[in-house]
Image (tube, rainbow, N blue to C red):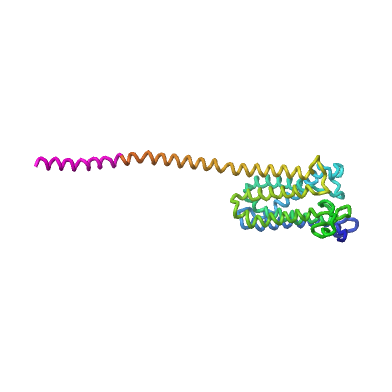
Amino acid sequence: MKDPNFNIAFSVGKFHIYWYAILLALGISAAMMITDRRAKSRNVPKDIALDLCLLGVPIGALGARLFACLSGTVAWNQFFDLTHPGLSFFGGVTFAALASLVYMMLRKISVGEMLDIAAPGVFAGIGIAVWGDFFNRTHYGPLVTKPSLKWFPLATFGNDLKVHYAAFFYEFLLCVILIVAYYVLLRKAVKKEINRFLLMTLFYCLGRFCIDSIRMDLVKVGPLAFDQLCEIVLVVLCLFLLFMKRSSKPMENTEDKMTDQSDTALEDNAEPVVVAQEAIPEETGSSEPEEKTDFGGLN
């Protein structure tokens, strides 16, 4: 393997344009275009994807920088220093999601439907943007000791110029698997639209937690990395929401059963009346032969 020392795409004077920024912009653009295209076939306002992007990107960038400072990746006095890199993925996603949620509630847009529309685009954007870590030589795992395993994309260079396992590529594969699972399985097997997004987020966080457990470039908070703590919170939140959605179904079924039982009881109460009404002509009919027999005896 050769050292891929090309993190700078091009320069304008002393101002450098990094590949990470370009790929991040491409990921955001891809997410917006996919979401906008899917939204056109649904009953949602026009250009809703563009509005969410214009709102979510700056607020998400603010959250990404804030979480980077909280995790210790960036010093607080460098918060507004754009020449010093450092963004937190979960900070950006959290702030962008909250801003989008408030926007959809104000516009009275179905949150579940919009999340289902945006799901493939969101994970496609993540899959594209994560390739920026390849150029930055971040998002890598342990050292590769066997020469037979030192091949791309299984392995890549870290910021120490040594060959490591390419954790960023594993996250890219995770996003591809989730998108394929959405179109092949989730759209048919899961009826509730919001549950599809929750399941994709749940499995993404579980997979990302495993990938982050081998990463060498994360800031640790005790035994776990800061990103892993965020992933645990999201997993618990997704499970809670999925459980709440599922537990609401038996209550509806119970009400339906109570209604059916009450209707059946009414029908059961009506049956004796019908029987009683039918019993009268039967008794009358049974007395007629006796009267004929008596008349025959008199004759």
Does the magenta stretch mainly form a helix, a strand or a loop?
helix
Residue 187, horizontal then vertical, whole percent = 61, 54
Residue 137, horizontal then vertical, whole percent = 84, 54
Answer with the quarter of the image where residue 295 lies.
Answer: top left
Quadrant the N terminus occupies:
bottom right
Q: 271 left or right of 241?
A: left
Answer with the quarter of the image where residue 261 lies.
Answer: top left
Task: Count the marks.
Answer: 0
Is residue 282 magenta-colored? Answer: yes
Answer with the quarter of the image where residue 153 lies.
Answer: bottom right
Is residue 270 magenta-colored? Answer: no
Residue 284, horizontal then vertical, whole percent = 22, 41
Q: Residue at x 85, y 52 (%)?
A: 143
Instruction: Identify the magenta region.
Output: 276-299
Residue 68, horizontal then vertical, whole percent = 81, 45
For the residue pair 162 and 138, the one nearer the viewer reads as 162
Residue sitting farthest toward the left? 299
For the residue pair 99 and 175, the one nearer the viewer reads as 175
Quadrant the C terminus occupies:
top left
Query: Is 80 drawn above or below residue 121 in the view shown?
Result: above
Q: Residue at x 71, y 57 (%)?
A: 176
For the residue pair 57 and 200, the one nearer the viewer reads as 200
Q: 286 left or right of 252?
A: left
Query: Is 139 drawn above or below residue 292 in the view shown?
Result: below
